[in-house]
Image (cartoon, rainbow, N blue to C red):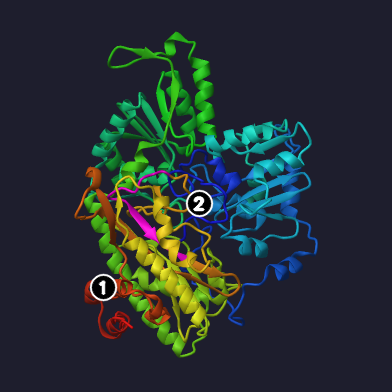
Amino acid sequence: MTPLTLSSPSLNRVLFLTSRYSRSPFLRNFKSLPLIHRKLPHNHLLGARCEASSSFTAKSSKEIRKARAEAVVDEKLTALRQQFSKPGVGIDAYIIPSQDAHQSEFIAECYARRAFISGFTGSAGTAVVTKDKAALWTDGRYFLQAEKQLNSSWTLMRAGNPGVLTASEWVADVLASGGRVGIDPFLFSADAAEELKEAIAKKNHELVYLYNVNLVDEIWKYSRPKPPSKQIRVHDLKYAGVDVASKLSSLRNAIMDAGASAIVISMLDEIAWVLNLRGSDVPHSPVMYSYLIVEVDQAQLFVDDSKVNEEVKDHLKNAGIELRPYDSILQEIDSLAARGAQLLMDPSTLNVAIISTYKSACDKYSSKPESKEKFTDGSSTKPSGIYMQSPISWSKAIKNDAELQGMKNSHLRDAAALAHFWAWLEEEVHKNENLTEVDVADRLLEFRSVQDGFMDTSFDTISGSGANGAIIHYKPEPESCSRVDPQKLFLLDSGAQYVDGTTDITRTAHFSEPSAREKECFTRVLQGHIALDQAVFPEGTPGFVLDGFARSSLWKIGLDYRHGTGHGVGAALNVHEGPQSISFRYGNMTPIQSGMIVSNEPGYYEDHSFGIRIENLLHVKDAETPNRFGGATYLGFEKLTFFPIQTKMVDVSLLSHAEIDWLNSYHAEVWEKVSPLLEGPTQQWLWNNTRPLAKP
């Protein structure tokens, strides 16, 4: 699953690979957008097939623009603009981001407002609608997709390209002086809202928080999907490794060390990790919609209690956690200020509705003597906010022994499922079966679903034949996907959520004879993959220092790719997590640390032709070096993913002897670890695909 895009001009976050922890999350929403790839929820369980009359669906930009040239009346835009003049609204423009109230990468279908209003279903994008214009910003991973999905009422803004205004610059320019720009404050982080406010104020515009109404919901109405309602489950201690009481104790120590008396947490994976709970509210991510407030002597979980069964209630009660209604979060924030709480908040992840409510309550109560709270040391204080990165993000990123073992175990079961799948796929293609990209994704899900502990996919499967493989975040749709063409490259990027771990793997294969160009590009991507896998570096090295290892071989012939090289991965949690990343964006100074898990996924893409990516997950661990210059600890990587890399795609003449040794050694490990889980023809397939390459 690919990380950052090269087309975006600035780092989105310092932590969480572009979506969570940069100096300002506004960069994600309005400058370069969230660069963690994938699309909005898609239910693979439907098993939909697509028409296979064509093996090529990626059209040129010129063809797409011609098809869109005919003017259309967009009824959704018309209805949205009618909301602008209603009492209590009174705005000249409205901004619709991709996020939910928790800044999630994946969101429940009922919160996919930007996709509903624009028709663009990519996971990264921001829509801006004025009284007479509509524009959508997305990054280089989605340019081709957006061209196809937007109608002529919309202007596509290719974020990061030279001369393209940011969303804030554009809306400030197109409005007459004194304009009012409306947002739903639950959908913007505090940093994002503040940056937007400052940007439009330069042109004398006002930012308007519409607390009581989301304008897209007003026109979506009865066709809007219902909120998720599946049950929450306890994440077993044998997989979590640390109990809730210990996690809360560590968190409370961090809160007090920061000079705070409470913390409010809105990131869903952080809540799930701290409480050892998992949910099914968000496709691909085992989390539940909730907020968590932890004080030095109590804690409250704000969640729809219809999702909480008796086992979960007992689990929470034993940890000293009280249940509160999800929608009562703002009332409790007000109550904390009334009690004089010093509230620790991460403004890059916490929505501005919460932070603004707290600030207003502090102003309201700070002058009242009764608002001062006596603490255990006898002191009293006025309520105030302490703004800093959530201490949970780092703790969650450093995997404990149980989490790491679960990741290793789940990756081996996943490899067994993939072996069954690829053996089946090659046989079907060679029999000239008329398979489509959707057929392939559905069949892969079937193979994975029979593995022990399988829960869900970890993202929408990218199943791209030929030119569709060049669309970095391509998702095949039943009505438009291609058949799998034996004469073209096939890229498959997929992953799974198991009860004990999360997987993410990409392989690129050819079912016939690849061209010399395809082999050269593949081999140079492989060389970059090997270089990063073998990297040894001093502790404290940020990820951007390692990114060039993966690109160097491509750079030598003037090639590159428009995404980052690696993202963090959760343990039975989100497939993208921070704070770590491996990216060309030097703004992320987060050091790569022992215990983290990252992806290694260089690639190369030729628009309208083919795409190549090779991805494994890696565990960061201490490296044994003969020297320790300056007393430094050195780090390296341990592979978690064990699955063959297609050797007929390799131009052996480009590889060094050391690189051939790496590939042969890797395939020997694949056979040793995965073959005991297989038998019969599938085991034979694995044997055939792990034979060593001969040195030239």
- Give the residue at the far top of this rendering: 369
Is residue 240 something one can see in this rendering?
Answer: no
Secondary structure at numbered mark 2: loop
Image-quadrant location for residue 384:
top left
All told, the count of numbered labels is 2
Indicate left or right for 558 with 662 as reference. right
Tell which tag, 2 or 1, sits nearer the viewer.
1
- Give how far apart the Cα atoms at labels 2 and 1 are: 40 Å
Q: Nearer the viewer, residue 657 or 611?
A: 657
The image position of residue 36, as x and y in percent, is 49, 54
Q: Secondary structure at mark 1?
A: helix
On the rendered structure, is 235 left or right of 57? left
Instruction: Tell whether position 600 is magenta.
Output: yes
Residue 438 visible in the picture: yes
Picture residue at 54% right of the left edge, 28% below the top = 356
Location of mark 1 (residue): 665
Q: Is residue 95 magenta?
A: no
Work out whether 494 lies above or below 21.
below
* Residue that appears at 44% across and 51% down: 281
Q: Quadrant of the C terminus?
A: bottom left
Counting other residues with Cα less than 10 Å from the Cα at mark 1, is it few (<14), some (14-19), or many (20 or more)?
few
Residue drawn at 37 percent across, 49 percent down: 232
Tell me the residue that label 2 is attached to. Answer: 107
Percent coordinates x, y for residue 655 in the rendering: 37, 75
Look at 58% across and 33% down and name the residue there: 194
Q: Position of residue 124 (x, y in %)?
A: 56, 53
Q: Is residue 277 above or below residue 283?
A: above
Q: Amino acid at mark 1?
A: Ser
Residue 495 in the image, given as x and y percentages of width and height? 40, 64
Q: Which residues are magenta?
A: 589-603
Mark 2, Cα crowd under 10 Å, few <14 / some 14-19 / many 20+, is many
